[in-house]
Image (cartoon, rainbow, N blue to C red):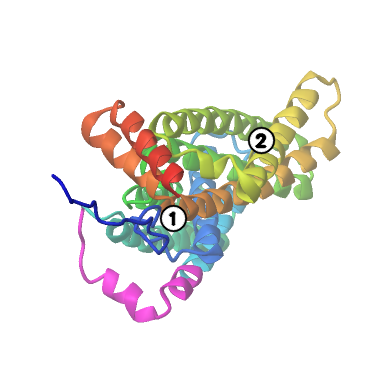
């Protein structure tokens, strides 16, 4: 049309909603990471103690004792960390007022309370009953009570080793929610490996090389399982598009060096050398156990930090949600959208 002029336009250089986080990072800090670590270690220590007491030949008495005491120590140390993160003890009390099967935090609270009660009974019964036998060859009454309670304590210990992974996976945090089963396996195998490593150190102090050798073997098998579970979790996150925060930057470096190299590579190498040696080295056993314990904490801390970073990346969240709703193809659409917005910027 004659005389028509297009309106003048100019690019907007102000704030937009592009790249803003779609979900909030969790308020969890090192206290929850430490709680997850202690809960898993103590739960698996109770499992090892129960298996040693049930299937052992009497030479495993120090493993049974140390496992029960370690389980009780974890049950006592964990709740203060959890309550400290909740900011007030009333929140923990309120969680016990209602039981919801759909809430990992709800049934996790009951697992924690049940584990603490049964671990207290097994440890107290062992302390009072000891390892001796009465005149008729039977165990003292206190020890029989401990042996009776050990089975439910072990079942609750299995819950302690894995329920925290279910709690994290139930959130909308992309890194945690994109590989729930693999992360549960990763946490569970790490819990077993760290518990076996801690008990192996106890056997080193007691001077029982045979028990130490068996615990080192269990720790190595669990560490190998953790390595496989970590690889499966990594593959699942790569397929969804949420793996970058656990591979890049300072968090990625701490995960690779602390969790994988130190926490898995060193213990597996130490165990392999001792297994092939005619005279296993006590030093290698101690180094492998300490590396497993340090790596277990490093893994959890890195997963927490990377998860919170993934919550701040809107592209990770969109990839995860579109993948879960429509399959793998929408990921390409999100990637194109991210590229388009970056060009505009």
Q: Is residue 76 above or below residue 309?
A: below
Q: Earlier in the sequence, mark 1 or mark 2?
A: 2
Image quadrant where one finds the N terminus: top left
Residue 319 relative to residue 192: left or right: left
Residue 269 relative to residue 28: left or right: right
Magenta range: 80-101
Depth check: give the residue in front, 26 or 130: 26
Residue neighbourhood size for the residue with mark 2, other residues' Cα within 10 Å, grouped as few (<14), some (14–19), many (≥20): many
Residues under numbered marks 1 and 2 in contact, where contact means CB atoms less than 8 Å apart: no
Q: Which residue is mark 1?
A: 312
Q: Which residue is found at the position 22% from the left and 31% from the top?
A: 326
Q: Quadrant of residue 100?
A: bottom left
Q: CA distance from mark 1 to mark 2?
A: 29 Å
Do we see residue 271 in this rendering?
Answer: yes
Q: Classify mark 1: helix, strand or loop.
A: loop
Q: Position of residue 251 (x, y in %)?
A: 61, 49
Residue 196 relative to residue 1: left or right: right
Q: Is residue 183 above or below residue 8?
A: above
Q: Classify mark 2: helix, strand or loop.
A: helix
Depth check: give the residue in front, 100 or 279: 100
Q: Position of residue 6 (x, y in %)?
A: 24, 51
In the rendered image, residue 152 lying in the magenta stretch gets the answer no
Q: Which residue is mark 2?
A: 264
Q: Which residue is found at the position 66% from the left and 35% from the top?
A: 264
Q: Nearer the viewer, mark 1 or mark 2?
A: 1
Q: Position of residue 252 (x, y in %)?
A: 61, 44
Residue neighbourhood size for the residue with mark 1, other residues' Cα within 10 Å, grouped as few (<14), some (14–19), many (≥20): some
Q: Which residue is found at the position 57% from the left and 30% from the top?
A: 227
Do we see residue 62 in this rendering?
Answer: no
- The residue sitting at the left extreme is 1
């Amino acid at each position: 049309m004659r005389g028509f002029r297009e309106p003048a336009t100019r690019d907007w250089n102000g704030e937009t909603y592009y790249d803003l986080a779609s979900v909030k990072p969790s308020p969890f800090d090192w206290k929850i990471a430490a709680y997850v670590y202690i809960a898993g270690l103590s739960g698996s220590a109770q499992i090892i103690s129960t298996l040693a007491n049930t299937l052992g030949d009497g030479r495993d008495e120090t493993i049974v004792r140390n496992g029960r005491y370690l389980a009780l120590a974890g049950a006592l140390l964990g709740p203060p960390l959890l309550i400290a993160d909740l900011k007030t003890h009333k929140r923990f009390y309120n969680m016990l007022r209602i039981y919801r099967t759909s809430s990992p935090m709800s049934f996790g609270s009951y697992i924690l309370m049940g584990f603490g009660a049964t671990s207290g009974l097994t440890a107290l019964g062992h302390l009072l009953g000891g390892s001796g036998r009465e005149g008729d060859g039977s165990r003292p009454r206190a020890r029989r009570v401990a042996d009776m309670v050990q089975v439910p304590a072990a079942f609750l210990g299995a819950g302690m080793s894995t329920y925290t992974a279910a709690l994290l996976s139930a959130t909308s945090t992309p890194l945690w929610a994109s590989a729930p089963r693999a992360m549960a396996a990763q946490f569970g195998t790490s819990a077993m490996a760290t518990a076996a490593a801690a008990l192996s150190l106890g056997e080193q102090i007691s001077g029982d090389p045979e028990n130490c050798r068996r615990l080192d073997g269990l720790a190595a098998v669990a560490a190998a399982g953790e390595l496989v579970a970590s690889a499966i979790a990594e593959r699942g996150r790569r397929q969804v598009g949420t793996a970058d925060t656990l591979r890049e930057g300072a968090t990625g470096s701490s995960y690779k060096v602390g969790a994988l190299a130190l926490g898995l590579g060193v213990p597996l190498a130490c165990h392999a050398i001792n297994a092939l040696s005619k005279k296993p080295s006590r030093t290698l056993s101690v180094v492998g156990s300490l590396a497993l314990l340090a790596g277990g904490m490093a893994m959890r801390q890195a997963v927490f930090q990377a998860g919170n970073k993934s919550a701040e990346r809107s592209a990770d969240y969109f990839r995860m949600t579109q993948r879960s709703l429509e399959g793998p193809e929408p990921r390409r659409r999100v990637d194109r959208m991210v590229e388009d917005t970056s060009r505009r910027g």
